[in-house]
Amino acid sequence: MTHGFSARSINAICTCRIFIPLLLMGMPCQTVTSQVYRPIKDNIMWDSYLMRDGDQYQLFFLQNENYPMVDPSRPSHLLASVGRAQSKDLVNWQTRLPINFNSYQNSYSLNDRMFIGQAPVKFNGEYYLFFDPRPRTQAGGSPIYLLKSNDLDSWKLEKEEPVLEIKPPYGGQSWRDLFLSYDEVDGLWHGYLCAQTATRSNREKPLNNFTSVVWLRMPKAQVNAGVFCIDLLAETGQAFEGLQLDKERRWQPASAQSRELISEQPLPETAEDNELICIAMVYDNGEVRMYRNGNAYAVYRGEGVNPRKIVSATIGRPRALDPKTAPNHFIGSVDEIRIYNTPLDLKRVKALKPTRGDFVPTQDDAMVAWTFEDATAKDQAGTFIMPEMNLGAYINNGELKLDGLLAHLYQPVISTPGMPCIAHVTSRDLVEWEYHEPIFATREFCNTECPDYFQIGEWHYMLFSTVRTRMDTGGRRDASGTYYLKSRSRNGPYELPEQPLLFGSGRGRMDNYIGRGIKHNGEWLLYFHTVHGNIASCIARPVTWGMCKKIVPLENGDLTLEYWDGIESLLDTDGGTPNAELGNGQRIGEGEIEVVNDSVKIITAEQSAVMLLLPHAYEDFMLRAEVTKNEASRVGFVWHHNGVASNSLVIGSNGMPRLSIGLSRFAAESVKSEFALVDDWVMADSVGDKCELRLVVRSHRANVFLNNRWVFSTSLIGGPEG
């Protein structure tokens, strides 16, 4: 499987050589000014906007002055503001005073806070800033208010009422992340928002008598774990039904009501480690019949489930009336889950089989089917929108992988009758707005955060970001980040390219997020956020503003990202580490290192790996190398970051032309056993047998390019804590 690229088949083994004509050009360390902009101490940064203002670029971003909870006496939800910085070259930045929202009263919260919005533009000599003061607990979407300023420092509220609210054809709860684009020909402002449609097709039916089926694998040590749960709409109290494993490894219903066991006590689970088992639960007029691998397992009795709508579903996260008594998160693999809106009889239960490759159950009337066979968490029955994979959940080989810590899948279902979409509104004065049909609506993504629009030549592009929808695409596995749409017209129709991920991370990581376009010196650039690995760790690590990439359109309108030479203003003019000195670095693995003239040559032995340990601990540097990739050998570099942590870049693996970046713990005689994969990319045929590798490390970030094409932007170990 090539994950989006047609990788050539390789059978023979030759050698892999790296030539290094220019290596390790030092960059001066800077604090405030750098191509990785970091907010001030104890602030988190998210949802940035960049605006051209004369010869300056104005950067706006949401921030919180007490995140995580540095000072418990200062509730963080009262301390949100808009951080600011400015630059002339998108490389060197100056921090400006933030925009504080404590003085803006509104009817949605007495706590005076700002959380979403803040699209900035300059219009008729004034600055406009849109924001949402809604508290997190406020239902009904996000009403958007407008501030004005003459100098970017002093702001006034345009009017007491919001200028943009959820109206048809939009519904649900999502109405945020406004992006504005001005059409000079029509004299019209176009606004795009992360939203939801008011209606959608194929609505799920209320559950009454139904069947849930789970195929899973788990370790023998697994006890007391919540596997799967459906939350149902309840007028009062809670209503949920699901599956859990008790402390004696017996399967039982997870329910908001008391259910009495009326059969013999079931036996504890006897499956071996990672053995595939099937648990079916048939709900029939108050009776719950449980089956294991098609055989009767246990019967419980309780009240019948009145016809109720599904509110949400979770996989891997426990559920209980009292959170203090909830079981653990599930550790293991979920192969498939189905929900049937009918109680299956014994014959059908015995005939159940999981989806496998070309095998799809015939005449199957499942209302919901999470199969994970297409490397996404999509409901293959088409009833639900794309779910969210949270806090470490990922898909591998057709199975949902869960770590037993916080990882889980969350299926938003009935919180809205609509689909995720990019809303479209227009205005001539930025106060009165006309609503249009959505630019894009989909079940393929769980949301369309921070939309962004730009035009290059005849092609119009729309960006949006989502981290909880992940898929195999663009040479990456379990990927997420910023996606793009393309069209021949501003108003569409827009199409999703075959490889829609413009910029992001694979392997379930969240190293890059919220990509946006900006035009600079005639070139379109992508700027973005950096995040440290995943949602959980980004709370403890800084969210920063990353190194711009050049946006390059192809003949068919598809986009690719390339190295932007604007960052070379940071290069040390004194040159870099001499190659002869690099040749003295420690060799790890089987192979040779030779210094020939001004180049370092690394040659691998057959069926082996060799890596060069760079001889110094480098903070900020650029490495350039010519790579000849051959067959199944591996070659790469290892370097120390901050003098403590080891990081590595590896080319080639297991007969597949693949580029990997990871963390290394190594001994002199070994590479493979100590290499911990962070992210990888299956090389496209277009890369060629010879290519130029470029590695740029700045602060806690590594950027990797092949033939100037962007491949990785990821966080390193040993990065800053704040």
Image (spheres, rainbow, N blue to C red):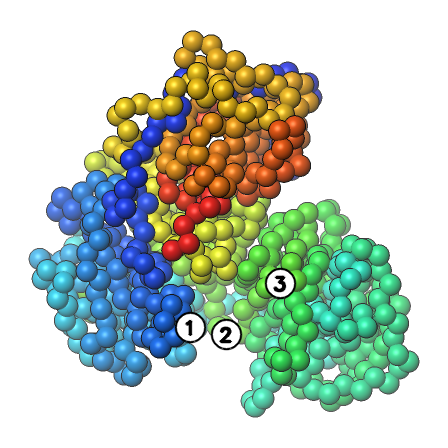
**Residue at the top extreme, as displayed:** 597
Sequence-first disc among 1 and 2: 1
Instruction: Say which residue appears at 30% left-offset and 48% top-offset.
Output: 37
Amino acid type, label 3: Leu
Amino acid type, label 1: Gln
The image shows residue 623, relative to residue 139, as above or below, that is above
The image shows residue 140, relative to residue 392, as above or below, that is below
Which mark lies nearer to you, 3 or 2?
3
Taking depth in this image into account, of 149 and 183 the one nearest to the observer is: 149
**Residue 442 visible in the picture:** no
Instruction: Say which residue appears at 75% left-offset and 59% top-offset.
Output: 218
392 horizontally vs 37: left or right = right
Instruction: Say which residue appears at 81% left-offset and 82% top-offset.
Output: 300
Q: Which mark is residue 173?
A: 1
Task: Tell me the element at label 1.
Answer: strand
Q: Which class describes the residues within 10 Å of circle 3: few (<14), some (14-19), or many (20+)?
A: some
Which mark lies nearer to you, 1 or 3?
3
Sequence-first disc among 1 and 3: 1
Q: How many marks?
A: 3
**Residue at the right extreme, as displayed:** 264
Distance in Å between CA atoms under marks 1 and 2: 8 Å
Residue wearing tag 3? 405
Q: Which mark is residue 527?
A: none
Percent across and percent down for residue 88 are 18, 42
Given contact means CB atoms under 8 Å apart, are the residues at marks 1 and 2 in contact? yes
Distance in Å between CA atoms under marks 1 and 3: 29 Å
Percent across and percent down for residue 474 are 52, 40
